[in-house]
Amino acid sequence: MTIESGKSRRGFLKSSVVAMAGVMIVPRHVLGGSGYTAPSDQLTKAIIGVGGMGRGHIEYEGTKLLAICDVDTKHLKLALDAAGGNDIRTYSDYRELLQQPDIDIVHIATPPHWHGLMAAEAARAGKDIWCEKPMTRTIGEGKCVVEEVNKHGRMFRLNTWFRFKSNFYGLGTDVKPLKKVVDSGVLGWPLKFTVSGITGYNWKFYWSGKTNLTPMEVPENLDYDRWLGPAPYKPYNPERVHSKFRGYWDYDGGGLGDMGQHYLDPVQYLLGKDDTSPVRVDVDAPQQHDDAVGSWRRIEFTYADGCKIVLDGENKDKDAAYIEGPNGKIFRGFKSDIKDIKKLAETLPDPEPQITTFSDSVRTRQKFALNEMNGHRSCTMVNMGVIAVRLGRSLNFDPVKQEFIDDDAANRLLDQPMRGPWTF
């Protein structure tokens, strides 16, 4: 029996989209109502990449794990032991996993150089997608993911959550009261945000790569060629893979790539700029190595209306507020020069509601709070910063065309060639 002919009614409904009078056929669990989920309609998931991050997400609400995939046999064994289930299927090739009709959600927890390609292929395979940050390693890959997710009617969640839950920046609050204050206009406009150790976050500059790596023998448990995938071939060295990969441009962008979307995405949301991007990025950084990521001193993003986001890598602005406007400031600990700002926030109207549980998004077919659209825009900021650091100069950006203005070298980094046979 073929995969296609062997599809259950549930699998057929999940993957079929009928373009007739604007009606989409959706999974049975969407139509059930009453909050009841039959056992046959329980959401199922698979994880691609079960290193530390993948093993940390074996369980999440409303789903059952059916399969895992990794190019390292040691990772697969550790994940199986952690999941405690002999009935979990294992794969070394994610493409085979994506063809399984009983999987609803695919969690992509690989290094970032795989995120865009896997997300696009998962969308084409009819899977909903939970993707780790950064969403994609390049701006061009992000555009492709947005196109494929929307073309195939999939739900997408990016795994950073500060825009809708948890305290961040040491501000002593989640984002909701800050959003209310910003939307009220009490701080004035334009606004300036400063992200640094002073306002609660130090960039992970220890994610800097080592240069002059000595080629070494690939361990038997690792399929290194498949780990590299679309990235350029470089001789194996343990510094390149697993927990060390963030220090190399081919796979990530250092501390900025690792944590940038966690801390830039809430600012994008607070400013109400989920559908656009900054028009300029200014950078102060030492000259970078062509392979290994280095540190930087300061990155500044500017929007068309004058709003700014400053990433202060040196923690130089000792008196900087987290949010500063013409009429007031908000500091770490939710302190402000505006009297009783916490009480004021309580009186202000709530922001628009968001779906903040991914299984709810999958069942209702309503976009998750941080989805492919706004996730791509906040990831674009990360990648703008990465490109400016790599080139060592300021860049002007067109947020509509999503390309740099009059800078061929920068635009060549928007869509970097993939090593065969990998392609979008």
Image (spheres, rainbow, N blue to C red):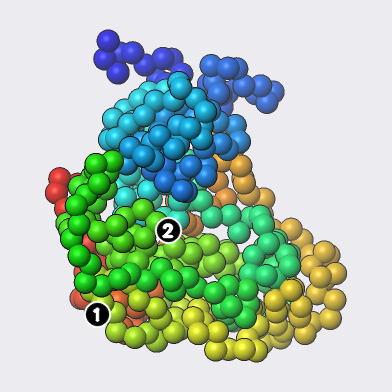
> Residue 406 got which mark?
1
Question: Where in the figure is residue 90, as x and y percent of width and height?
Answer: 36, 29
Q: Kindly identify which residue carries mark 2.
A: 134
Q: In the structure shown, which secondary structural element does the residue marked by tag 1 occupy?
A: loop
Q: Nearer the viewer, residue 150 or 48?
A: 48
Q: Quadrant of residue 3?
A: top left
Vertically, is 92 above or below 281?
above
Q: In the rendering, at what x and y percent does residue 52 appear? A: 46, 48
Q: Which amino acid does label 2 sit on?
A: Pro
- The single residue placed furthest to the top in the displayed view is 1
Image-based side of 113 in relation to 355, left or right: left
- Residue 138, label in figure: none
Local secondary structure at mark 2: loop
Picture mark count: 2
Q: In this view, does 186 lie above or below 101?
A: below
Above or below residue 241? Residue 266 is below
The residue sitting at 61% across, 36% down in the picture is: 61
Disc with the residue nearer the chain's start (2 vs 1)? 2
Query: x%, y% of residue 197?
Result: 59, 78
Q: Position of residue 102 (x, y in %)?
A: 42, 23
Whether residue 51 can be seen here:
yes
- On screen, residue 183 versus residue 6, left or right, reads right
- Tag 1: amino acid: Asp
> Is residue 138 visible to the viewer in this orientation of the structure?
no
Q: What is the CA distance from the residue labelled 2 to the residue labelled 1?
A: 26 Å
Which numbered disc, 2 or 1, marks the residue closer to the eye? 2
Label 1 crowding class (10 Å Cα cut-off): few <14, some 14-19, many 20+?
few
- Disc 2: CA contacts within 10 A as few (<14), some (14-19) or many (>=20): many
Relative to 424, is 290 above or below? below
Q: Residue at horizontal 67%, vertical 50%?
A: 353
